[in-house]
Amino acid sequence: MRKPEDFEGKSAVKNTQDRLTLVLIIFLILVFLILVIFTSLLFVYYDRIAKDIAHQLNNVKECTSQFENKLEQHKNETKPSCESGWLEFDGHCYFFSHFQLSWTSAQMMCLNRGSYLVIITSQEEQEFLNQHINKKTYWIGLTDEKTEGTFQWVDGTLLNSPPSYQFWNNKEPNDYEKKEDCAELSIAEKWNDSPCDKIQFAICEKRPI
Ligand code: GN1
Ligand code: CA
Ligand code: CA
């Protein structure tokens, strides 16, 4: 036979267990809620940071693009360009005359145009000129009028002073009949000395303004 105190004792233990379980459940729910709130706050915080970074990145991109545009504009504004009728090569402008004249008149004509008879100082320049002579012969700014056999460019540079680029045709200069003191770029795409009073085309060269 069980005593009534036994029942009371067991019921008290059960009540305590139920209460503990309830407290535990409430505690777990609270922990869960705190975790949910904390995670949500973290999410909101990182989302804001991500948006902020994206915004900054956009700003940087915009600044870069504006800088590139300004740079391009500056390049275009400062880029040397040749006036109409002149061809540009390696920062210089070239005029291929469409009329014929003596070497001295050609030099005057170039001076009047703010230029000089072409001075050739590289293989590339020679090749550029050859691309435009169109099977015609042109005066260039080279002469041995001052001292026979000593060719000099119109700026006073001696042809033989290094680095000396020379594109004479075979057996030229030959001072044919002792009458040839002015150099031409001939149809053969090479140089020849010729009589200075010969009438032919001319190439002027100048630096762009
Ligand atoms: C000769 O052959 P041609 O006319 O292109 C001469 C040149 C003289 C030129 C005078 C190999 O050239 O040196 O300057 O006549 N070429 C040769 O017109 O003698
Ligand atoms: Ca000569
Ligand atoms: Ca000659």
Image: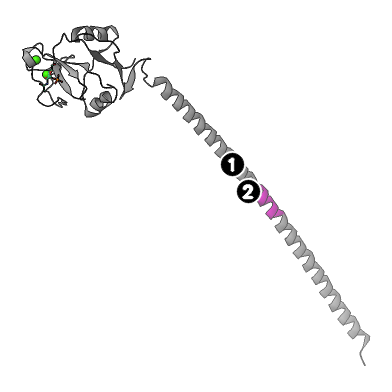
Q: Position of residue 158 (x, y in %)?
A: 12, 19
Dot 1 corresponds to which residue? 54
Q: From the viewer's perspective, is 100 left or right of 156?
A: right
Q: Residue 46, labelled with which disc?
A: 2
Residue, x 9% and y 25% (percent of image)?
Answer: 171
Rendered position, 2 above or below 165: below
Q: Is residue 194 visible?
A: yes
The answer to which of 16 and 25 lies nearer the viewer is: 25
Pick the front one: 53 or 145: 145
What coloring was used for the rendering? Answer: one colour
Location of residue 2 (image quadrant): bottom right
Is ligand 1 closer than 8 angstroms to the Cβ of mark 2? Answer: no
Query: Within the displayed image, which quadrant is ligand 1 positioned in?
Result: top left
Residue 128 picture location, percent across and down? 28, 26
Q: Amino acid at mark 1?
A: Ala
Residue 32's image quarter? bottom right
Amino acid type, callout 2: Tyr
**Which residue is painted at 60% across and 41% down in the image?**
52
Q: Is residue 208 magenta?
A: no
Looking at this view, is 190 or 40 the one in front?
Answer: 190
